Amino acid sequence: MSNILPKKQIKVADKVKSKKDKEVLPIEYEPVNEVFLVGRVTSLAVEKVLPSGDKVVEFRLVIGRKHSRGLKKEVDALDIAAWSAKARRAALTLKVDSWVEITGSVRRRFWRAPTGLASRWQVEASDVVRL
């Protein structure tokens, strides 16, 4: 995976007009929503069956920050969701404190809670590999 987004070939037809139809902007990049993570599992994977009948396996991953401010080590804790059968099976084999590699994308999930509409961000894992 490259850190630089590939430039798209721009043609006259590949232009987007603003809402006011006054300004024309070229499309330079394709949208990309891909993540590659390596971290340590901090919670056992739990399989949930949703009211729709769909299954999802969820667990949490902690990732240390490479450049932290000051002397205190900083980490990010991320919620991971595995939806495909292959990713669910792999996630269910993970043990706490094991290292894992996740490939996927960022998603925002919405649901109705007793207090109203709720949401959270999570990484949808397309591939889960134990290291």
Image: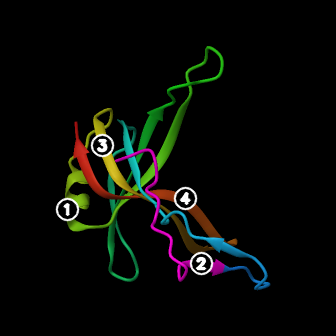
Circle 4 SS class: strand
Q: CA distance from mark 1 to mark 3?
A: 14 Å
N-term mark: 4 or 2: 2
N-term mark: 4 or 3: 3
Of circles 4 and 2, the one toward us is 2
Circle 3 SS class: strand
Q: Residue at x 59, y 78 (%)?
A: 15
Q: Residue at x 30, y 43 (%)?
A: 101
Please state which amino acid type lies under the numbered disc 3. Glu
Q: CA distance from mark 1 to mark 2?
A: 39 Å
Q: CA distance from mark 4 to mark 2?
A: 31 Å
At label 3, counting other C-alpha atoms closer than 10 Å, the crowd grade (few under 14, some 14-19, many 20 or more) is some
Read off the residue under disc 3. 101
Circle 2 SS class: strand
Of circles 1 and 3, the one toward us is 3
* Residue 44 in the image: above or below residue 74: below
Of circles 4 and 3, the one toward us is 3
Please state which amino acid type lies under the numbered disc 2. Lys
In the rendered image, the quadrant that contains the C terminus is top left
Circle 1 SS class: helix
N-term mark: 1 or 2: 2
Q: Magenta stretch?
A: 1-16
* Residue 127 in the image: above or below residue 111: above
Read off the residue under disc 2. 15
Q: Main SS of the magenta segment?
A: loop
Please state which amino acid type lies under the numbered disc 4. Trp
Q: Residue at x 50, y 26 (%)?
A: 66
Tell me where residue 99 appears, x and y as whole percent.
Answer: 29, 35
Q: CA distance from mark 4 to mark 3?
A: 19 Å
